[in-house]
Image: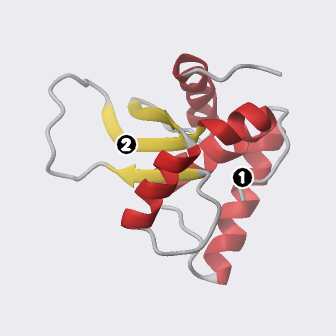
Amino acid sequence: MPLWTEAALHTLAKKLLKHLKVTGATLDIFLLKDADIAALKARFIKKKTEPNVLSFKDPLAFPHPEVRAKYLGEVYLNKDILRKEPERAAPLLLHGILHLLGYDHEKKADAVRMEGLEAKILAAIGKKGKSR
């Protein structure tokens, strides 16, 4: 049962971005306790779903002088879920990255497309699981 650290998740993110054919990009990954991610989710997202992963795209005009690569945004993962179910790290992180890349699941066709890509990438890196 791996202990997921931000560094380990960044390594996983690099692998996922490579399979998504995204180069020259970076993102921030944060691990939050269940109560903290639930509060953040309640503030920005009104859906009643498990507070497992949140993504916030980088505002287009926001400067990042410390980052030389294209900055995608932030992914927040529920560290309590990852502690109990470490196998969910890849699906949740991938789901968050896909949101940063503009994918969503508001419409049925978009959900099918996103879930299909998730399954393809997870199979390619030898991981299983669903993000939701």
Question: Which quarter shows the N terminus?
Answer: top right
The coloring applied to the image is secondary structure
**Is 99 above or below relative to 14?**
below
* Residue on which the image places disc 2: 72
Res. 92 visible in picture:
yes
Measuring from the top left, give residue 14's x and y in whole percent: 56, 26
Label 1 SS:
helix
Measuring from the top left, give residue 112's x and y in whole percent: 72, 72
Label 2 SS:
strand
- How many angstroms separate mark 1 from mark 2 (CA)? 18 Å
Measuring from the top left, give residue 87's x and y in whole percent: 80, 36
Q: Which mark is residue 4?
A: none
The three-letter amino acid code for the residue at tag 1 is Glu
The three-letter amino acid code for the residue at tag 2 is Leu
* Image-based side of 99 in relation to 121, left or right: left
Task: Name which of mark 1 and mark 2 comes first in the sequence.
Answer: 2
Callout 1 crowding tier (Cα within 10 Å): few <14, some 14–19, many ≥20: many
* Residue on which the image places disc 1: 118
Q: Residue at x 72, y 59 (%)?
A: 132
Q: State the image quarter where residue 19 is shown.
A: top right
Q: Are marks 1 and 2 in contact (CB under 8 Å)?
A: no
Q: Residue at x 72, y 62 (%)?
A: 115
Q: Residue at x 39, y 29 (%)?
A: 24
Callout 2 crowding tier (Cα within 10 Å): few <14, some 14–19, many ≥20: many
**Is 39 above or below relative to 13?**
below
Front position in the image: 79 or 8: 79
Measuring from the top left, give residue 106's x and y in whole percent: 56, 78
* Image-based side of 123 in relation to 45, left or right: right
Front position in the image: 53 or 81: 81
Front position in the image: 3 or 107: 3
Q: State the image quarter where residue 2 is shown.
A: top right
